[in-house]
Structures are given as C-alpha cells and as structure tokens.
Image (cartoon, rainbow, N blue to C red):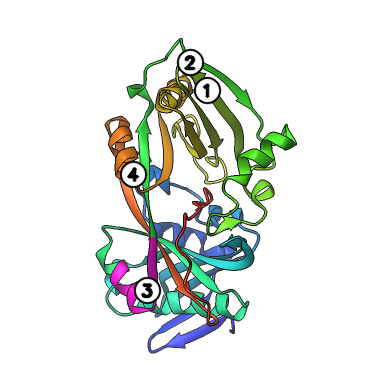
Amino acid sequence: MSSSIRSTDISLRDARPSDSAALQSLDGAAPDSGAALIQARRNFFARTVAYSRCRTYVAESEGQIVGVNCVALNPVRVAGRPCMAGYSFNTRVATSMRGRGVGSLLMRAAASWVEEQGAPYLTGLIGVTNVASMAMVTGLGWEPIARFDYLVLDLARFVPDPEVHIRKVDALGDPAHAAWRFGEVYLHHFVPRYLVSDLFQPHPRGPYLGSLTAFGPGGSAWVSLWDDRVRRGLDPERVRAIKAYDVTLKGEGGFRAFAAIAAILRTMSLDHLLLPLPHDLTVRALLEPYASDVVEFNFCVKRLNGADPVPPGPVYFDVRH
C-alpha cells in the first residue's frame, strides 16, 4: 500500500514526527487518575516505540488532522504455532468528524497493511461500553474472542501482613525457574514469541522492574512489575502508578499473599497498581473492593489471508498494549 490514500474528502498518510502535538491534542488531555491512568501519556508516540514494527496512519481533511490509528506487527504464537499478528490501537477521530467513516477508513488501512505482510490475524482491545466502536469493527469483520478486566487497584486499601514473606527476584536470573514461569503461558493465544526479550528486559533497557514473590499461610503469589512512565512522558513523582503482569496465585492463601505484595508497593512511592486480568466473576468479586476503577475490554480479532478461527483457549494480555 502506498504511504498515502484518499477517500472522498479524507486522505490518509503515514504520521510524521512533526504531527506529535496535533496527535496529542486529538488524543485528549485526560487527567492522570482513575481509569485514564491505563493509557495516560504526554508523548503520543510513546506506545508505538514499544514495538519493533509499527505504523501510524493519520487522517486529514482540509489540511487538518482529524483521525489517527496505530498498528503494530508482532511475532506471536497462536495455538502454540508461531505466526505474525497485527495489533491495532489508539484509534481516535475528531469529534466533528465522527459518523463520517473516518474510523472505518483507518481500520481498513491498518488491516490492508497487516494482510500485505502475510499475517493471519489483526487484533485489538475495545472497551465493552464503547458500543459505537464495537459496532464499527464487527461490521468490518472483527470478532470478540476474549474479555479482560483492567483494574486500577488503590494500594491504600491493602494492609501489610507480617505473616507473609516477600522477596524481589529477577525472572531471568534462574533459567530453570524462568522456563517454569513462562512455560505456563506459551500455549496462550497471541503470547509474544520472544516473550523474554519483549517483556522482561530490565531497566534501563526495558520497563521491567523485576518480580515480587510472596509466601504466606496456605498460599503464594508472584507479580511482575512494568514501569513505562518515563517512556510515556509522565512524571513519576506525580503519576504514582505502575502496571502488574505475569500474575500467579497459588493455594487458598494466594490472594492473601498477593494483598501483602500490594501493601508493600505502597512503600515504593506508589498509589495505584494497574492490573489486567482475564474476565472472571470470582476473581472480579475478590478484587473489586480494592479497585478505584475497573475497565472492561473485548479482545477482538479480524482474520486475514484465509486464516482459520482462533481455537478456544486462553488469550495472553501483552502488557505493552
């Protein structure tokens, strides 16, 4: 596909660094609190640099930027088999242009590029309550195959537990331990093929802060931490929130061990922990009293190049998303 396409009075082109201010304005200036923490940033291109191959489409009308969509191409595994998959994200359309097909034009351009690269799937996360966007993508052939709850945990609601023992570890420090940790997720759909290099590069090379493991009465917990605040142009002194991933609870006391980890994070100058989890009513009921906000996302897939449907099974949540 050429770097510029046109439809009626809307033209698409690749984004340029000089577009940053206009795109950031289009993205909005949401407060760095509550659910907005999940995607808060001051550098529009911060999310794109997390991927080795990414393209950003800009929609213009009468010389003004009226829409944007980013799409990354990632090596993943689906049903245990390696393939490439696109990830479409950060679709924004100016309020004055909504309902005029700008979003659909951007999404079709992203799908065409990913298909040209030979990838069998294009994926994306869409808020469950975003009825208009869900209607748009399903009309374009997308299918929801999983749901995630993204919780904004208020760390002040957790109480330290002296009976739980916590230590910080490096998931990569022990190859045998790393193989055990990661072996559990390698059969998840859309797990990064190069999981270690993509998601577990420690500071300063990557946002991985290390992992915390906790052992207490009747159970244990494991949590890995992801801090991309500086990359997103956020001031860590003011935005006191990081992300959690690679979370595992074991035994009846697993949640107690996790709660002790959350309480310890409060002592690290943090107020909130952003935690994406597969939608599960039991887990949701357990954690919701500790959450200041919960955002539900549909994980949607568009099949390309004659791909078969994604088989039933768990979907991996890539913390870069």
* Mark 1 element type: strand
Q: State which tag comes first along the sequence, 1 or 4.
A: 4
Q: Is residue 3 left or right of residue 36?
A: right
Q: Which residues are magenta?
A: 134-145
* Residue for point 61% across, 57% down: 51
> Can see residue 63?
no
The magenta stretch spans residue 189: no
For residue 214, the mark is 1
Quick check: marks 1 and 4 in contact, CB under 8 Å? no
How many neighbours does mark 4 have within 10 angstroms: few (below 14), some (14-19), or many (20 or more)? some
- Between disc 3 and disc 1, the foreground one is 1
State whether residue 182 is above or below residue 51.
above
How many neighbours does mark 3 have within 10 angstroms: few (below 14), some (14-19), or many (20 or more)? many
Which of the 4 image quadrants contains residue 205? top right
For residue 103, the mark is 3
Q: State which tag comes first along the sequence, 4 or 2.
A: 4
Mark-to-mark CA distance, 4 and 2: 30 Å
According to the image, label 4 marks what residue? 35
- Expressed as whole percent of the image width and height from the top left, the position of residue 101 reads 33, 79
Which of the 4 image quadrants contains residue 76? bottom right
Which of 253/191 is in front? 253
* Mark 4 element type: helix
According to the image, label 2 marks what residue? 164
* Residue for point 50% across, 36% down: 248
Which of 285/267 is in front? 285
* Residue for point 42% across, 14% down: 161
Mark-to-mark CA distance, 3 and 1: 45 Å
- Between disc 3 and disc 2, the foreground one is 2
State whether residue 76 is above or below residue 202.
below
